[in-house]
Amino acid sequence: MATDALKAQVRSKWQDAFKRINSNNPGITGLMAFSEVGHAVVHEETTQHLFSKQSWSHTLAFVKPINIKEDPPPKRADITTARRDFEVVNYCRRLPSDWCLDDDYMFSDEIRQKFYLVREDIDSYLSDYELSKDLSHISRLILRLKEWYDAWTPPEELGATIRNAFVLVFQTQLYSSLGPTFVKGFKDLIASTFPSSDPDIPSQTLDASTWVIFETLGFLDRYENIIASAGYEHIEAHVLEACAGQWETPMMDTLRTWMSEKVVPWLLLMYGRDANTTDEARALLSTIGSRFDFHVAKTLCDLRTREIFDIIVDYPDSAGALQDLKECLQRVDQRGALVKSLRKANRKRLLHPGAETRLILTQYVATIKCLRIVDPPGVLLFKVADPIRRERPDTIRCIVSNLVGDDDSGDSLVDESEPIVPLQQADTEDYTDPNWEPEPVDAGPDFRTNKPSDVISTLVSIYDSRDLFVKELQVLLAQRLLAITDDSTEKVEKERRNIEILKIRFGEAALQVCEVMLKDMTDSKRIDGHVQSQKASIVHPTIISRQFWPMLESSEIVMPGQFQILQDQYAKEFSTFKPDKRLRWLPHLGTVHLELQLEDRMLEVDVPPLEAAFIELFSEKNIRTIDELINAVGSVDKSAAFKALLAWVDLGVLKEDEPGTFRLLEVAEEAGPARDSSSRIAPTTEQDLAPVTSLQQQQAEQMKVYWKFIEGMLTNLGQLPLDRIQTMLRFAPGYDQTIEQLAGFMEAARREGLVGVKDGLWKLTPR
Amino acid sequence: MKVTVKHWHAVAQWRWDTGNEDDSGDGDDVCGICRVAYEGCCPACKVPGDDCPLIWGECSHVFHMHCLLKWIGTAASKQQCPMDRRTWVTAERKVAKTHS
């Protein structure tokens, strides 16, 4: 029986409740309104009856957790009474969260205490799962949990409050009992519900009811991340499987179709379960759908970023992949990652010492073409190109020789079908253009707008000025023109054609010099024709305008004997023809066709002039030392002289009896490696290309001149800092080196011991 | 041994015969007006040589013909050689033969 204290307590609570139900209305009007809702009239006796244990216990039976393993379904008392009891309690709002209905009964405690029953089940199922890794254990566990849940749920008639409280307590208990093993198993279970991309393996489909169970148990909210990540992983796996190495066609559409066919139905179960109509479903799916779509794009983008180097190698067979990449990059902001990945791949796979410059350029051209598809404004290209352009000293030469079709090896860098257009200048931006667009946000400060232009323009734009290209082109052309030995107009015409093409690209003015060089070729021929008609000569010179040819290797050699006579005769004839001009021979250039009459054999050879000069000297005297020979032709580099002599030794005409002394073999010696002259039909290719000094040599040559200035400066002024030297050198005519180049030069001078540096001040080393 | 030259493809540079016989050095003589080497061409021309010939004066000064004619054409020149301010007289013996 209730004690006095309880009665007092109930009474005071009752007063509170009465006030609340009466809504502070006068008298009992509020209470009257309350009764009208159709409930029993609440009076003190009823309340006391309610709180008396006997009748309340019937009611409590509805909410008492039972052990479904053993207990039979509980006998249920009259549900209407119970409902009325609960309603009263509800209305009185005497139900705090921990459900103190009675002094010795706590509903939530009851659940907690009984939860060990559930936990036992969970543990047994999970240990089964851990042993067998069979997902059916997990699904059975979930079904079992549902049974527990159903058995313990208070009947609906008891109102929402108690149910909510029950759900809260039950789920809290449940989640704390489910460890990481379950999470993993659950994830696998979800993943197994995806339609497999392999049609042979039937996927484990969970019907809608399973999802209802998930929801009932609160898994969908609790494990939403896990479900989503299972989805993401499924997508990743599919994308990798379907797209890796598949570059021919764009995969994005295929992936989207796959998404809508396979993934969306799954998404509907998960996220669209509350939807009644298609529109509602669409609305529900739109957020999650776009998240998944984004994930597809991101995965594909990551994949393509990893593959980018090979994609470029495969271009143009990989156009599809590039389209994908473009589309993905618009959706996913991964441009930085792409640049980083490509630069890394380039450094690792392309820019190593083993790679030919030509290969690097080919890859670079492919890069240009590919990145132009991915990113038309060229920002990506600009960022990637940087290391490539600085890598090799012979890059320009390689490009130029390719431009003039000098490459024997394989395909041209330039697409033949691409129309030849003038090189594009970096033009200033036209802000009045209604279609003007600002530079892309990720463009660096030194980004030069590169309007979609042809490959050559982009190649040339690698370097800050095209003068370098033109100079290199000039050197190359000079080499090729001087190498033309026979009077074949064809070859000259071919060069002319090349130059004409290049003129379109580089502009008329830049190639004016080349024009003059070509004109020299034809003029020489005309002059030669005239001279020959006056007085036939076996000399057929190419007469060049020295201001317009690249610097030629200077040589001091004097042709001996009959060569001298031939030269003089021709020069005289020339002066008669052009009285105001004179010829100045460059005796080390060209080729001589000789016939050697030896005692036992005849030899016809094409040789460079130096070799001809030497053999001429041997016709006077059979045995000569190398020093003697060098003196006879003026000054010549000893190694060059040696090389020339060895060429004759190779032909079996000379023999080196003792080091530095050569003997003419009037009679062939068997032992000597005498070779048929036919093996020397084209001996000149290499030598003939050599005489034109390369651009670098020219620069070095130039610096020698400036060295005189520097020397003078340092002698007169003592120590000088580098920038002071640079400033003073600027006064020198034609000085165009940057301070970095000067620093390099000074460093070289220091290594040679000419100068010393201390605290940034340079001074001459006293000799 | 007898060496017979059958064919010689030689390379040579042409120089203007400016009267300076010591053309051994590489020092490029330049036109006093445009400061471009004689073997180059005047600023108005693109092709050197016969298309942009030199002109020799009695005063021994030599210029690109185009440069000098342009100078003579201005009123300020007073028909004088720009180097020594003597009245310009073209050295006939050279210029007559310039034309090819």
Image: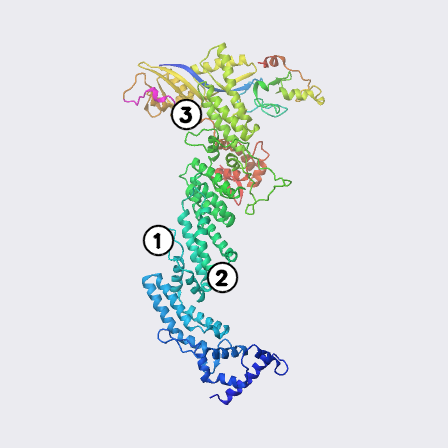
Image location (x, y in percent) of residue B86: 68, 19
Alpha carbons under labels 2 and 1: distance apart:
30 Å
Quick one: which residue is furthest to the bottom in this view? A4
Q: Earlier in the sequence, mark 1 or mark 3?
A: 1
Query: Looking at this view, is A650 or A146 the one in front?
Result: A146
In the image, what residue type sits under mark 1? Answer: Ile
Question: What is the secondary structure assignment of the residue under circle 1?
Answer: loop
- Dominant SS of magenta comes to loop
The vertical placement of A629 against A108, above or below, is above
| Front label number (3 vs 2) | 2
In the image, what residue type sits under mark 2? Answer: Asp
In the image, residue A521 lies in the stretch drawn in magenta = no
**What residue is shown with label 2?**
A274
Q: Can residue A111 be seen in this view?
A: yes
Q: Is residue B62 visible?
A: no
**What residue is shown with label 1?**
A201
Marked residue chain, label 1 = A
Query: Looking at this view, is A452 or B54 the one in front?
Result: A452
The answer to whether A557 appears left or right of A11 in the picture is: left
Whether callout 3 and callout 2 share a subunit is answered: yes
The vertical placement of A221 against A166, above or below, is above
Query: Looking at this view, is A293 or A266 the one in front?
Result: A266
* Image marks 2 and 1: residues in contact by CB distance under 8 Å: no
- Span of residues in magenta: A671-683
**What residue is shown with label 3?**
A685
Query: Looking at this view, is A764 or A354 the one in front?
Result: A354
In the image, what residue type sits under mark 3? Answer: Thr
Image location (x, y in percent) of residue A283: 52, 57
Marked residue chain, label 3 = A
Question: What is the secondary structure assignment of the residue under circle 2?
Answer: loop
Alpha carbons under labels 1 and 3: distance apart:
68 Å
